[in-house]
Image (cartoon, helix red, strand yellow):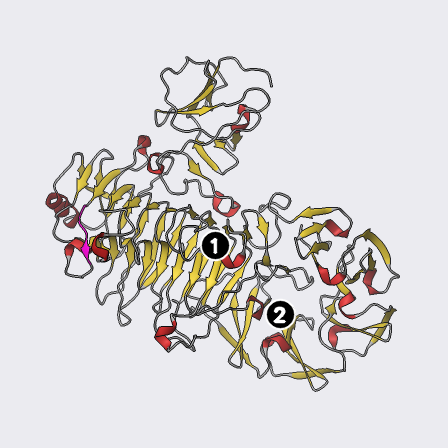
Amino acid sequence: MKKLSTIIFVISFLSSISFSQTIANASVISTIELDNSFYSFIKEINNEVYYKTNVYKGMKLKTGQKIELEVNKTNVIILNHQQTEKIYCFEIKSLDKTIASTEKSIERDERDEIIISPFPFCQTDTNPIGGGVGYETNFNQPAIHAIITQNTSPLVFKQIIESAPASSIVIINSNVTIDLTGLGGPIQISNPIIISGGRGTDGSSGATIKTSDYGLYSFDNTLGFTLFKVNCNNVRFTGVRFVGPTTEIELENGYSQFKECIRIYKEGIETGGLEVDNCEFSGFPYAAISIGAPDYNKPSFKNNKIHHNYFHHNRQSGFGYGVIITFGFAKIYSNIFEKNRHDIAGVGMKETGYEASCNTILEGGNDTNFDMHGEGPSDHSPNAGKFIHIHHNDFLDLGKERTHIQNIMIRARPDVQCRIENNRFKHEKIYNAIQQTTTDPEINNNEPYPLGNMLVWNNIYDTNKYKGKYIKNKWNHFTTSNQITFPSTDQEEFSYATGWQTSYDQNIFAFGDVNADGYTDIYKVEYGHIYTIPFNAAYNDSWTLLVDTDYSFYSLKFGNFNSDPRTDVIVKVNGNIYISNAIQNNWSNILTTSAPITKFGDFDANGILDLFHGVNNNWYVSYNTNNNWAFINNSSYNGSSITFGNFDTNHKTDVFLADGTKWYISHDGTITWEYINDSEYTTNQLTIGDVNGDGISDVILNWNKDISISGLGAWKTLNTVNFPLSTFPFGNF
């Protein structure tokens, strides 16, 4: 690249590109990495412009706003965001062949760059993750109760809030700071109101509400308890910067010190609808937000939404939560979490749970990021809450400076499920990212409780690697490519260390379509019953009993064994194969055979599984798994030396062979072997599945997960670079 001279641009999306005056006296507050041309970071998408880097950071400029770029004599590009009247400078360290620089650290509460989710699912949200500049706050025209334009005393502020009538709003100008130190008790909110602080407006960090009070935990110790106690439905906090008394982990005298910011709880009355958005929380040694109170006999607190906030430095030894669900349920989404003890936690009581999605978790947490404790009775185990759904979160925290390095820890068995899917983890190993554990053995005389209801699939590890189990949201009973497992080493599988941690097998779930609606359902076998639940289950869903069975999960085969598109199950007992049609009817005999029920395909493309059997150098098929054996081919290769796939477009099952030197296909299982590729690997070192969604099976190398497309191409690494999230056929990224 030729050396650049001073160039000044003004880009306006109301008019064509023009020129402007040089920006003088700009100070460098941030530097980033650029591509080989500084033009590359301006990209117009649907009348919007995103400034992006290769680390998913950026600042969004909307139609009608202007930016100014300058390359001056000191080789600095200056970007001026007209709306916020702030100047951003980006240093160019080389002007020869590339333009590059390193990022300069700035305090995140002063940042205006936007963290962009890697998931297309989250990118449909036009508001920035974590709120701030660019966040659009919408109100349903509430009546204005008060506008606070200057700093005011704690008692006056308390009176304003507590006297606000239902459906009104209290606006705190963004330059106002309210110090509640010495208030002497929580502010009681008993009407559905809005408290607004203007965070992000004109680049503001929002009106500040702070306190220096904290103390030992007690409901009647006002120093150590909450700032705002919400006693009713439908209260909203938006655009406020809350600052607690301390950001330290170890507090004075070794005693746990308490302060929380917001708690929704009214004794004996079910309360919910709390919304907290576009706020910043720091320095609360107990919690920033608490949902409910610890009492089994009280109603739960549901329908709460915590979104587009920035939680940081809420921590101390043994406590410190961004959001804690004590008794209730909340949707927690599009937040930034940084340097909290637990970003999200639940105490594990019945009815407790959360849905966490589209959050970004930055480095520096001093315990597991997302957590659910084990508490109280459940069927066959203590609760780890009722329902937890963790999806589309970006876990960038490796936990290097803490005892438990895992991002997610579920400490017992949820009553319904904990479903962890469509997330991205920086951790390379699955077990370093996720754990399910028993309750502390001291509670049960060192006897571990049974675990379960832990569903983990469709995630990204090591920043961009596909590992583990992947399942499609929509179920097509005419194909066998609805799911795939990319084999892992023992160190990568979802398993656990020794001690009081216990493994939980992810392979005890089956998948199909229970009601022929075309959407995937989940099956499990427990305590003599087969249960099902929708793949996209929500908080109010539960496992449905289908049939009783004396057979173990591993002896059953789930699939389509008749023309009914609902999934069936078969089992072999004493040489007889029995079926439960749609897993809803009594067992009936469909075939008597000595063949094992291990290899199935669809050799006539009718959407019904056929049983395959190789014996005495011959291949046989029982079509629909209920007909007499039909000879289809002869071959000396059987058992583990062959596997099945679809390597052409006729939808009939093909037989695949890898003998350590070459790969072969027998199309439809009836054609003579056809050579397709050279390879040193044998069949048992490979997995067959359709990774790119083109309907043709691909070949995956188990040990490092390289892929040969259609079995014909050279090896490609199985990662999000070669197989982008936006087009990956499994999950819902």
Identity of the residue drawn at 42% across and 26% down: 64
Q: Which residue is mark 1?
A: 391
**Amino acid at pointer 1:** His
Q: Which residues are magenta?
A: 212-216
Q: Residues within 10 Å of mark 2 (few under 14, many from 20)?
A: many
Give the side of residue 429 with respect to residue 609, left or right. Answer: left
Mark 2 or mark 1, whichever is nearer to me = 1
- Quadrant assignment, res 612: bottom right
- Residue 342 vs residue 530, the one in the foreground: 342
Question: Are discs 2 and 1 less than 8 Å apart at CB?
Answer: no
Q: Which residue is mark 2?
A: 566
Give the side of residue 92 with respect to residue 485, left or right. Answer: left
Give the side of residue 232 with respect to residue 222, left or right. Answer: right
- Which numbered disc, 2 or 1, marks the residue that appears first in the sequence? 1
User: From this viewpoint, is residue 393 visible?
Assistant: yes
Q: Secondary structure at mark 2?
A: loop
**Amino acid at pointer 2:** Arg
Identity of the residue drawn at 18% across and 34% down: 149
- Residue 651 vs residue 81, the one in the foreground: 81
